[in-house]
Image: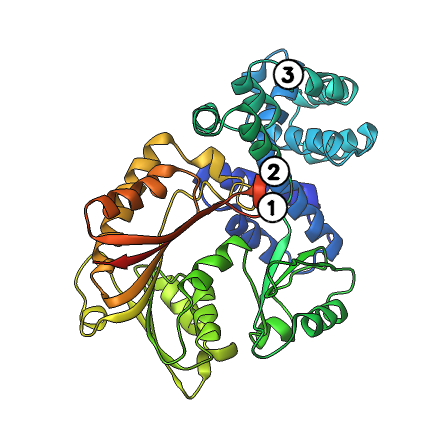
Amino acid sequence: MAKGPSARRIAVRVLQDVERSGGFSNRALSRQLERHPGLDPRDRGLTTTLVYGVLRHRARLDAHIDAHAKRPKGLKGETRQALRIAAYEMLELERPAAIAISEALRSLERAGPLRGAAQAILGAVGRHGPELDAKWATGKPLHVLERRWSIPRWLGGRWLKHLGEDQALARARAVAAAPPVDLRVDLGRISADEAAQRLQADHPGVQIERLEEHPQALRTRGGGDLFYGPLHGEGLVSVQGLAAQQPARVLAPAPGSRVLDACAGMGVKTLQLAELMDGQGTIVAADLDERQVAEAEAELGRGRLTSDALTLTHVQADLTADHPALDAEPFDAVLLDVPCTGLGNLARHPEIRWNRTFEDIGARAELQARLLRRNLARVRPGGALVYAVCSFAPEEGSQLVAAVVEEGQASLEHERTWTPEADATEGFYVARLRPR
């Protein structure tokens, strides 16, 4: 039987796919892994580690490679990806240079004369890596952010302007690390202690941390794919970042209320709203993307979504426009988690730093403002809307909300920005508003 591709070879293909398409790394990774169902679980884990690690450190890895290359511009495509992987293994995983170089050369079997150059470059990376990292960790803050921490210059400049040097560097270090997997526990059906015990039994090797101020959250590392297993299948736990859990909690819909989950996506927040409502009331889950609506409907078997006392309707709709299912009757509460640049999620989706530009912020903010104004009008007098965005950019968050408040369309009851450097979670801006 022919031997399948190695973890490193698959990682090269994923990285090429992400770079060419500008798409999401998790989707490109899933596509490749699905093509190799017989891949050993350890190799699946290594492939994942290599893909996300290279994307988090890409500019730094390129700086190391280019420092020792005679013709850096000639190192393209799969050759460049294989070099990045080997450099990452040496610099971050502390893999012996001989092993990392040998595996890289195996991935470059068809690279011809570049094999010799690759071996020389990687040998130099192994010898001089710590020295160059130390050099690039000092100097002008913008250069440090770019070369040592792989933050694009346009983004690093914004962080320095809005945060100052110390916090900008703290943020860069935070998003360079592999994030944990956070779970939300349905405390109405299972205690966090019991969930942790069952999780440990279902996923041997998982490390579980309780978060004192967040009783509904479990923080995990290791243990394989937590989307599988009876706990997740029954809706007793859901994979959801700690900051992403907060918008629904801030909205705090009462049992029996009528709630709109605007920009509902694949339904993780919809299930959370049903939990908070104790499975009683009405939820309309709406999204523009027909595929996401279909995926959300496929989740109907999980948790409180099938409660006899809950009416749940999925709607495919443009939430900036009129729609009979959204405008026939006002809502007691609206959760508006808007589409955004995703700049708050650079650790979990590191490709975002390479796929976004400054212009994307303005384009998203224009859509977000229209979504906010239109959906404020869907809230009954005395009701509430929570606006949430997974971005650090003030244009997508605090500035946008302030403009609506200054116009007299709403009053602001609560706002908070969650950050990786202060809260050890993804970046999220959350605001609770009362329409006027």
319 versus 180 height, above or below: below
Q: Quadrant of the C terminus?
A: bottom left
Q: Are marks 2 and 1 in contact (CB under 8 Å)?
A: yes
Q: Is residue 259 left or right of residue 27?
A: left
What residue sits 40% from the left and 37% below the top?
A: 393
| Placement of 303 over or under 249, stated as above or below | below
Q: Is residue 285 shown above or below 373?
A: below
Residue 40 visible from this viewpoint: no
Instruction: Say what secondary structure mark 2 lies in.
Output: helix
Q: CA distance from mark 2 to mark 1?
A: 8 Å
Q: Is residue 429 left or right of residue 237?
A: left
Circle nearer the N terminus (3, 2): 3
Q: Work out whether residue 344 can be spotted.
A: yes
| Separation (CA) of disc 3 from disc 2 | 18 Å
Residue 188, image x, y percentages: 56, 78
Q: Residue at x 61, y 28 (%)?
A: 79
Q: Which label was assigned to residue 424?
A: 1
The quadrant of the rendering that contains the N terminus is: bottom right
Q: Which residue is mark 2?
A: 174
State the image quarter where residue 361 is shown: top left
Find residue 138 and name its label: 3
Residue type at the position of mark 3: Thr
- Give the Cα separation between the discs numbered 3 and 1: 25 Å
Which of the two discs, 3 and 1, labels the residue nearer the N terminus? 3
Crowding near pointer 1: few (<14 within 10 Å), some, many (20+)?
Answer: some
The residue furthest top is: 70
Callout 1 amino acid? Ala
- The residue tagged with tag 1: helix, strand or loop? loop
Residue 33 spot, x, y in % from top left: 61, 54
